[in-house]
Image: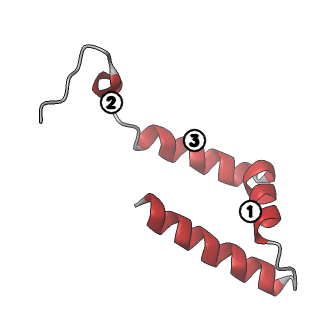
Amino acid sequence: FERIADHCSNIAISLIDKAKNNMNTHTTLREFREKSEDFQQNYRMYLNKYALPEHLFSEQSSLSL
């Protein structure tokens, strides 16, 4: 899913850059993530919504193979 999201992000940033006649995708993406309050709010909301339970990462849990 992360890879799919990265591809979608790259497509969106490319379209934004093309509309502005600017093909500096890394700078555009960094500025968007750092300066967009809407992005920050949505990021925090989805981070909390889809976070894995902490007990999965505790030292006491063990994975059986």
Q: Residue at x 86, y 82 (%)?
A: 20
Residue that label 2 marks: 53
Residue that label 1 marks: 29
Quarter of the figure with residue 41: top right
Q: Around disc 3, counting alpha carbons within 10 Å, would you say few (fewer than 14), some (14 to 19), or many (20 or more)?
A: few
Q: Are marks 2 and 1 in contact (CB under 8 Å)?
A: no
Quarter of the figure with residue 19: bottom right
Q: Point out residue 24 in the picture as x, y percentages from the top left corner.
A: 83, 73
Q: Around disc 2, counting alpha carbons within 10 Å, would you say few (fewer than 14), some (14 to 19), or many (20 or more)?
A: few
Measure the C-alpha gap from mark 3 to mark 2. 16 Å
Q: Amino acid at mark 2?
A: Pro
Q: Amino acid at mark 3?
A: Arg
Residue that label 3 marks: 44
Q: Are marks 3 and 1 in contact (CB under 8 Å)?
A: no
Looking at the image, tell me whether mark 3 or mark 1 is earlier in sequence order: 1
Measure the C-alpha gap from mark 2 to mark 1. 29 Å
Q: Residue at x 46, y 58 (%)?
A: 2
